[in-house]
Image (cartoon, rainbow, N blue to C red):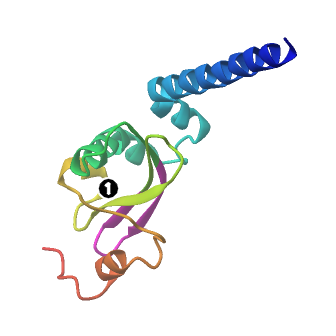
Amino acid sequence: MQRRWNRDRLSRMILRVLVSIVVLIIVVALAGPQAAALVTPDADASETVRRILPDAKRVLIGNFELPVSSVRYVGIETRGRDNLIVLQFEIRVFPFITVDRAYLSSRCTPITELNASTMSGGRGVTNFATDAELQHLRSDLQPDCP
């Protein structure tokens, strides 16, 4: 009798754990991007940058064909002589545990005239300061702006 009672109790406990895991997966799947955005909001940005952030996030998700994901703006790099602008982002793809870094960049266009859909971009950046593609973009090898 005691063994049967222990076995039933163990079965109920395992069932509860499994149901809890399934409920957690459903909650994360349904509320993932919104929850990630609440936990990690965008960095402060100027009004000009805030204007293009929604489009920039859509461009990143579309260009990289990301499934359910959360995109967070983390910063901007600018250089006045050639209007270099690099918008820096963190991307979390379902299940929102790991972070991938990405950027959108533009040269020769003033920040007030930026259009996210015409910006170049990259993904898989480990460090924005030392990334090879961004180093090339910053280099003097770039042609002068018209």
**Badge 1: residue crowd in 10 Å (few <14, some 14–19, many ≥20):** some
18 is higher (above) or lower (below) than 125: above
What's the magenta region? 73-88
- Residue at screen point 74% across, 22% down: 10
* Element type at mark 1: helix
110 is higher (above) or lower (below) than 79: above
On the image, the x and y values in percent for residue 16 come to 67, 19
Residue 89 found in image quarter: bottom left
Q: Is residue 95 visible?
A: yes
Please state which of residues 109 and 2 is positioned toward the viewer in this rendering: 2
- Residue at screen point 32% across, 56% down: 111
On the image, the x and y values in percent for residue 106 come to 26, 63
- Residue at screen point 38% across, 46% down: 48
Left or right: residue 9 versus residue 115 is right
Magenta stretch: helix, strand or loop mostly: strand
Left or right: residue 22 versus residue 100 is right
Residue 107 found in image quarter: bottom left
> Which residue extends farthest front?
1
* Magenta-colored stretch includes residue 74: yes
Residue 81 found in image quarter: bottom left
> Which residue extends farthest bottom?
141
Amino acid beneath label 1:
Ile
On the image, the x and y values in percent for residue 132 come to 36, 80
User: How many marks overall?
Assistant: 1
105 is higher (above) or lower (below) than 29: below
Quarter holding the C terminus? bottom left
Please state which of residues 96 and 16 is positioned toward the viewer in this rendering: 16
Please state which of residues 72 and 95 is positioned toward the viewer in this rendering: 95
Quarter holding the N terminus? top right
Q: Is residue 115 visible?
A: no
* Magenta-colored stretch includes residue 84: yes
User: Which residue bears the numbered disc 1?
Assistant: 111
